[in-house]
Image (cartoon, rainbow, N blue to C red):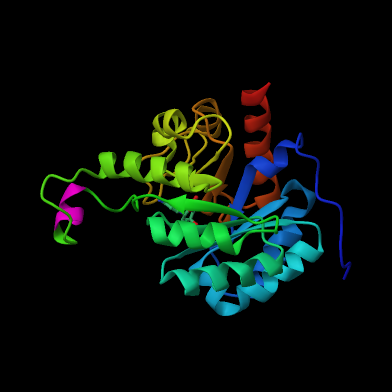
Amino acid sequence: MSLSVESPPASDMRHKLIIGLDLSSVDEARALVARIGDAGTFYKIGYQLAYAGGLEFARELVGEGKKVFIDLKLHDIGNTVEEGVRSIARIGATFLTVHAYPQTMRAAVAGRAGSALKILAVTVLTSYDDQDLAEAGYAPGTSAADLVARRAAQARDIGIDGIVCAAPEAPRIRTVLGPDRLIVTPGIRRSGAASGDQKRILTPADAIRGGADHLVVARPILTAADPRSAAQAIVDEISAAVA
Ligand code: C5P
């Protein structure tokens, strides 16, 4: 295994596609990454794989020159978040998610200091609507849309590197964040593809034109007969949208 390989240049459109390794074993993930080969440069590891050896696998990917997004949506007391982020920074990950609570975001920014890790904030989970917020104890009348905007502004002011949001929200979030912060969006499907349980979907081209910097795609690649071609087709669509 090589210890360190050059990452692709920023102009390489492959890095705009983040392939979600929503798999339950490292063996499956390793096999998928091998099948995708050089069509994929950026992988996301979430709860499912992280708690099945995925953090060690993250080191392996980084050693092979891949970029890694650790999607653990951290939220705890400040000291715990700061130290946890510091440990993840040592893995060599590129992105890490935290919930967009001010204390948590400040701690995450402190924890990633001096490293190349970028912190992405999750404002309001997309599975939450206004009723879910009321049930969770937020003041009656609190709207998810307003809370998303408020937390995106707080994230910007605290120095968070970017936001994860549903693709259709990207244009509005971009107006809050300004041009320099990252927007990362799941819920991407090529036209005509099955949407699965994703309700608010956009095509890769529309998401990029709407201001997304990186797209997270899992099932359309994981379940494709040819995952490498599926990834390549999305990268081609991103390249055409950027050109
Ligand atoms: O399979 P699919 O392309 O829908 O997967 C999208 C990925 O993005 C999954 O890893 C999922 O957990 C993640 N995600 C999402 N919606 C959010 C936040 C994260 O689908 N609001």
Which quadrant holds the C terminus? Answer: top right
What residue occupies the far left of the structure in this picture? 140
Which quadrant holds the N terminus? Answer: bottom right
Percent position (x, y) of residue 200?
36, 40
Task: Report the front residue among 172 and 200.
Answer: 172
Task: Report the front residue among 64 and 77.
Answer: 77
Percent position (x, y) of residue 16?
65, 41
At 70% across and 59% down in the image, what residue appears? 115
Queried whether the magenta region covers residue 41, the answer comes back as no
> From the viewer's perspective, is 197 left or right of 203?
left
At 72% across and 54% down in the image, what residue appears? 36
Q: Main secondary structure of the magenta part?
A: helix
Is residue 199 visible in the rendered image? The answer is no
Percent position (x, y) of residue 57?
69, 72
Percent position (x, y) of residue 132?
19, 55
What residue occupies the far bottom of the structure in this picture? 52
Please provide the residue range marked out in magenta: 130-134
Task: Report the front residue among 220 and 150.
Answer: 150
